[in-house]
Amino acid sequence: MTTSLRTVGRLSAAPNLLVMLPGVGMRPEALFDAGFARAIEHRRLPLDLLSVDIGGLGLDAVDTWDALQKDIVLPARERGARVWLGGISLGGMVAMAHVAARPGVADGLCLLAPYPGSRPSVNVVERAGGPDHWQPNEDDLRDPELRVWQWLQRPPPELPGFIGHGTEDRFAARIQRVAERFPPASRHTVPGGHDWAAWSPLWEQFLDAGHFPA
């Protein structure tokens, strides 16, 4: 069965493409309603933004990942574009899962308040003394969240990244554990919770970080 993806955005053949995966229950239009595209245009950045509907998408939805690769990533790469992958909340974890399952699929990551995994999954890692001490077994790796944490043990050092969250985010402590797996310059916090009040200023910081020089 062929999976078709619903996307929102318009490609202009810019040299950079950012594919964003919204959070659970979030329409892909929400990023545009929040002004994400306007912020790019205001800065005149050479960056196209595409938001993908991940309604019903789980971390094991390989057919959807295949469609993401075939319909979006490969065509952009074939025309010479750099492709960044990103996400908000659960979309952030799905983005990491995609990169973990397909090394080299992305030229960078933009993670806004990425869902860090359920408490039982995170506890497996914490009980072992943290990611640097955890040695996953076969049972662990049947859990797609723990496969993300296996990737987080050694994220590719050459992969540019941005990870940010609100200091009052209900997942803040666990998101910080994720952020600590990336270089300090990639980590960002702003006041706010798990909502647009934090995600919008984080988006502004991401665009101002110099990843896409005009």
Image (cartoon, rainbow, N blue to C red):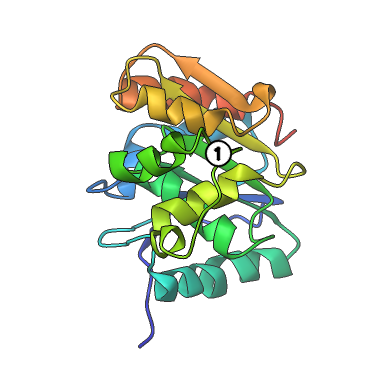
To which residue does mark 1 refer?
A: 131
In this rendering, the answer to whether 185 lies above or below 77 is above
Residue kind at label 1, given as amino acid type: Pro
Q: Is residue 7 visible?
A: yes
Query: Split into 4 quadrants, where in the image is the C terminus?
Result: top right
Q: Nearer the viewer, residue 102 or 49?
A: 102
Judged from the image, the secondary structure of the residue bearing numbered disc 1 is loop
Left or right, 14 with reference to 201: right
Residue visible at 66% across and 22% down in the picture? 184
Q: Quadrant of residue 41?
A: top right
Side of 130 where 35 appears, left or right: left
Q: Position of residue 207 (x, y in %)?
A: 59, 29
Q: Residues within 10 Å of mark 1 (few under 14, many from 20)?
A: many
Question: In the rendered image, which quarter is residue 99 located in?
Answer: bottom right
Which residue is pictured at 42% across the width and 76% down the height? 63
Residue 137 image point, x, y percent = 49, 59
Q: Nearer the viewer, residue 185 or 201?
A: 185
Residue 74 lies, with reference to residue 14, above or below; the image says below
- In the rendered image, the residue lying farthest to the left is 25
> Who is closer to the viewer here, 7 or 196?
196
Where residue 182 appears, as percent x and y from the top left, is 63, 33
The front one of 77 and 160 is 160
Residue 18 in view here = no
